[in-house]
Every structure is written in structure tokens, then in C-alpha cells.
């Protein structure tokens, strides 16, 4: 290749690169418009409302599920339309879907790797699981009703098939919300055991000559082994076991409810846990079987620097948190130390530095997952590394004890918000049940947190925040309003209401964000 050819190639490459850069910038502009339209018409509006046994389902969710179901139905009946062949293809498709379900022991690990929220990954896992169950059921029905082949139960391969089918049926029943939500910790272990029995039964049932079907399962098991080894290495490394320092410890303290009768109520108090690095925390010394329990906790601390400890804010319910409560409740002052192993921290990070104002709505223990973001936005304002200029925390609580337990955290955030007396953080706490002497009372050590009686009109506050009228601007200077973030970690009713209200203000550059942890209703 002579010099002229080299020159032509380089010049053409530069021209193509410039054209691609221009096209990328144009696509980025259209992407924002498209994202706003998708959010308004597909993501936010619900077609099926929230119910105890099903929902909620948005337009986009239903569209994706129908597309996924249609593709699987097409592949089952594509080509040979005979029911016998369709049954075989359904069995093979069930195994292909199974490879995704077997990819990891803990869903949080794979969700972090794929960089999606745990909530979305659970939806994907649930959809793939039900499709696999439906395909496997169709495969069994075609084999029994159409093929009518001899199926002697005393043969090991056939008995293994019955064992796998039975485990799949039990798994389908236990996966229903009616059973899953009542005994969730037991459901997790039963889920894993039943999947193991199903895989064993399928491997024994598949003929040795069917190499492709076995390959699907081997791929899933291989992926499971790889992710398990990686997670084990990370577990040992982050717990300091490679360095020989021994396992970390969890320092657990208790805040009793405001009423005397709350002492006997498992939900009448609040547990604070300080541990080196959390989210999924195991407590080997709490009870005989606590080593088998993995409990998800939410981090309430944030720091720009490396942290030696993180704070957890826990509402005791059942299982491991109830065991912790029984240990620390007799100690009104002080704390109890336990050996602990942790994995994580898990979770999808949501960037918040590009917003001019943020409205953070929390209810009950939803405050826990909002605090790190609030701290980060205050830090960004103090260091001029973000565009935030106003931050409003609205916290709905039922009684005073939760607010008192979090008072130290709130005072700490307000104390950090002192850059040039900017005071971008305002805190409004609305109480449902407690009776206040006045309609508006100061709360804490600063004059920017107030207690209110009743509930808030969310449409009014979102309208005010979206308008930008509450942000102080320099006179005689054209200052275009920036984007507004509505961040929610609240009960279902509050979250759904804010979701509907926010949809009406998307044209004012308002974005809606649901945090990973959402408190129970």
C-alpha cells in the first residue's frame, strides 16, 4: 500500500468518525425525547392495578411479557405442527429457559453483574420461571395424552421424571404470592431444594443420546458453579478472611417504642446494626439455624471515602430480625455484639448529580434507603460537583418512635448542609396517628426540620418543586430551570399515587425514580 492509499484511508476514517460523532449527538437528543414518551405512555401508567395476589402491571410490562410468550409459542409450533413434536420442542425450550434460572444462587449477585435493579431482575426471573413451568407442563401433557408411550414407573428414568415433575408442581404452588409472602425465608430454601430435585430428575430422565438437551442443563450448572465460586471469593475477601483477621462483628442496639405495650410487640421497636459492609448479613451466633439465613438489609450511611463501618436501620418482623430483637430488647442502653458474614453491598446505583432539585418521599422505614442519596447530593452541592440547588425530604410516619430513632441521622444530614449558608435541605415529617400540640413543630437541633399533623397533598408539592419557584435565583439573569427528581421509597398506596401525579409533570423535565427498597404497606 503506497502513501496515497494510506492517506486516503486515514482521511476517510477521520470523516467517518466525525459523522458518527455527529450522529451520536443527534441520537442522544432524540433519546431523551423518546425516553420521556416511553416513561409517560408505557412505564408509568398501570393497566392492572396492584392486588394482593397479582399486579401491578404497566403497559410496557404487559407488552414485554406478551412478546416473550409469543416468541415461545411460535418456537413450540414452528415447523412440524404435530402435537408430539411440539411437546418435544416445549421440553427443550423449558431447559433453555432453565439455563437462565440456574445462573446464580443469589439473585442480587447476578443483578449487580447485569447492572439492573434487583426488582427488575426478580421480574425477569419470575417471568422466565413461569414460562419454563408452562412449557414443561405442556411437554408432560403431550407425552401422556398424545404420545401414549409405555411409562413403567419402576424404571429409574421414569421415576426420576415423576420426581422432577412433582417438585416442579410443588414449586409452582409455593411461588404463588399467597404462600411465598407468608413464609418467605422458608420459601427461599425450599425453592432451592426443589430446583435441585427437578434438575436431578430431568438429567436422569433425558436419554443419553439427547446431547443438546443435556448441554442446556450443563451450561446452566456451569454458570451456577462459576458465579458461586466468584461470589465465594468475594465473600472471603470482603470479610477479611484472606488476611487472617477473623470474621467481622455486628454491633446491634435497640430503640424501644414510645408506648409501654410496644415492649411485647415484635414490631414495636427499632434495631440499629453497625457492621463493616452489609446488605445481605448472616448472623451465625444468633440462633442454632441462623447460619442458614441470609437477610437483606439496607445501608443508611454514605461517605466519599472508604468506610470502616456502615449503619443499618431495621424494623423487626419475623425470622432473623425477630431473633435479633429478642437478644437486644432486654438491653435498653448499650448493644450486643455478634459474629457476622456479609455479602455485597448489592444494588443498582442511580446517578443523581444532574438534577437541579430533588423531592425525596419516604414513609416509615423507607427513609433508610433515601439517606445515602441525600448525603451524596449534599456532598455534591458542598463540593460543586453536582447541579443540585434544592433538596426536600418528605417523610410520612405513623408514630413518633420511628422519627426519634432517626433523629440523629437527620441532624447529621442537616449539619452537613452548611455550605455558604445555602441550606438546600428541608425536612417535612408528617405524622398519621400522633397528636401534636400545634400544626407545625420544629424537630431536632436545626430549624429546617418540622413535624406536621396528617398527610401531605403530593400533587401540590410536586407542582411547586417542578415549577422551580422555590429555588432562589439571581435577579436580571436568565436562568433556565433544570431537571427535577422525584425519588420514592414509600408504601404501595403512596408510591402509586405519586407515580400518577408525576406522569402529569414529565413535560416539565420531572423524572420519577423508585428506590430498590420499598417498605411494606
Image (cartoon, helix red, strand yellow):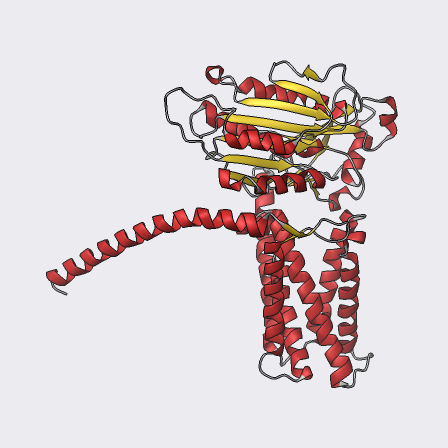
| Image coords of residue 56 (percent x, y) | 69, 50
Would you identify the image quadrant in which residue 238 lies? top right
When the figure is inspected, residue 447 is found, relative to residue 42, above or below; the finding is above
| Image coords of residue 128 (percent x, y) | 64, 61
Residue 276: tell me if it is visible.
Answer: no
Q: Which residue is drawn at the image coordinates 39% and 47% (left, top)?
A: 29
| Image coords of residue 395 (percent x, y) | 66, 28
Pick the front one: 101 or 462: 462
236 sits left or right of 432 in the view: left
Quarter holding the C terminus is top right
| Image coords of residue 262 (percent x, y) | 85, 27
Q: What is the tally of numbered marks visible in this picture? A: 0
Q: Which residue is drawn at the image coordinates 74% and 52% (left, top)?
A: 188
When the figure is inspected, residue 253 is found, relative to residue 352, above or below; the finding is above
Would you identify the image quadrant in which residue 367 lies? top right
Quarter holding the N terminus is bottom left
Residue 326: tell me if it is visible.
Answer: yes
Pick the front one: 298 or 233: 298
Q: Which residue is drawn at the image coordinates 82% and 32% (left, top)?
A: 326
223 sits left or right of 332 in the view: left
192 sits left or right of 301 in the view: right
Would you identify the image quadrant in which residue 455 lies? top right
Amino acid at each position: 500500500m503506497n502513501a496515497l492509499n494510506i492517506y486516503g484511508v486515514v482521511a476517510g476514517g477521520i470523516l467517518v468518525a466525525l459523522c458518527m460523532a455527529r450522529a451520536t449527538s443527534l441520537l442522544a437528543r432524540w433519546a431523551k425525547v423518546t425516553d420521556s414518551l416511553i416513561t409517560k405512555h408505557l412505564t408509568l401508567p398501570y393497566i392492572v392495578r396492584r392486588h394482593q395476589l397479582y399486579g401491578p402491571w404497566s403497559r410496557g410490562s404487559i407488552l414485554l411479557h406478551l412478546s416473550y410468550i409469543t416468541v415461545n409459542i411460535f418456537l413450540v409450533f414452528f415447523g412440524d405442527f404435530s402435537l408430539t413434536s411440539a411437546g418435544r420442542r416445549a421440553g427443550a425450550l423449558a431447559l433453555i429457559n432453565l439455563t437462565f434460572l440456574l445462573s446464580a444462587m443469589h439473585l442480587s449477585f447476578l443483578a449487580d453483574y447485569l447492572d439492573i435493579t434487583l426488582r427488575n431482575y426478580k421480574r425477569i426471573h419470575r417471568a422466565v420461571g413461569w414460562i419454563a413451568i408452562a412449557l414443561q407442563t405442556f411437554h408432560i401433557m403431550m407425552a401422556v395424552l398424545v404420545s401414549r408411550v409405555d411409562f413403567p414407573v419402576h424404571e429409574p428414568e421414569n421415576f426420576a421424571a415423576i420426581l422432577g415433575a412433582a417438585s416442579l408442581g410443588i414449586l409452582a404452588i409455593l411461588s404463588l404470592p399467597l404462600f411465598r409472602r407468608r413464609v418467605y425465608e422458608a420459601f427461599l430454601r425450599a425453592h432451592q431444594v426443589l430446583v435441585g430435585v427437578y434438575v436431578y430428575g430431568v438429567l436422569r430422565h433425558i436419554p443419553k443420546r439427547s446431547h443438546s438437551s443435556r448441554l442446556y442443563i450443563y451450561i446452566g450448572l456451569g454458570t451456577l458453579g462459576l458465579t458461586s465460586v466468584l461470589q465465594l471469593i468475594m465473600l472471603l475477601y470482603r470479610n477479611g478472611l484472606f488476611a487472617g483477621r477473623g470474621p467481622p462483628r455486628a454491633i446491634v442496639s435497640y430503640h424501644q417504642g414510645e408506648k409501654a405495650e410496644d415492649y411485647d410487640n415484635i414490631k414495636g421497636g427499632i434495631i440499629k446494626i453497625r457492621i463493616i459492609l452489609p446488605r445481605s448479613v448472616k448472623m451465625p451466633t444468633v440462633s442454632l439455624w441462623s447460619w442458614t439465613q441470609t437477610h437483606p438489609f439496607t445501608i443508611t450511611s454514605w461517605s466519599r471515602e472508604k468506610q470502616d463501618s456502615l449503619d443499618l436501620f431495621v424494623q423487626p418482623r419475623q425470622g432473623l430480625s425477630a431473633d435479633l430483637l429478642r437478644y437486644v430488647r432486654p438491653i435498653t442502653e448499650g448493644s450486643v455484639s455478634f459474629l457476622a458474614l456479609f455479602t455485597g453491598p448489592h444494588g443498582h446505583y442511580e446517578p443523581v448529580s444532574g438534577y437541579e432539585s430533588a423531592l425525596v418521599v419516604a414513609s416509615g422505614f423507607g427513609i433508610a434507603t433515601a439517606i445515602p442519596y441525600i448525603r451524596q447530593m449534599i456532598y455534591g452541592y458542598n463540593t460543586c460537583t453536582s447541579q443540585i440547588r434544592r433538596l426536600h425530604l418528605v417523610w410520612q410516619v405513623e408514630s413518633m418512635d420511628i422519627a426519634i430513632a432517626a433523629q440523629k441521622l437527620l441532624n447529621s444530614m442537616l449539619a452537613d448542609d452548611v455550605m455558604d449558608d445555602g441550606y438546600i435541605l428541608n425536612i417535612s415529617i408528617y405524622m398519621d396517628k400522633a397528636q401534636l400540640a400545634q400544626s407545625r413543630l420544629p424537630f431536632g437541633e436545626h430549624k429546617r426540620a418540622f413535624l406536621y399533623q396528617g398527610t401531605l397533598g403530593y400533587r401540590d408539592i410536586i407542582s411547586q418543586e417542578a415549577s422551580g419557584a422555590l429555588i432562589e435565583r439571581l435577579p436580571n439573569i436568565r436562568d433556565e430551570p433544570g431537571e427535577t427528581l422525584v425519588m420514592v421509597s414509600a408504601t404501595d398506596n403512596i408510591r402509586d399515587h405519586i407515580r400518577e401525579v408525576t406522569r402529569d409533570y414529565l413535560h416539565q423535565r420531572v423524572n420519577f425514580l423508585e428506590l430498590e427498597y420499598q417498605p411494606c404497606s
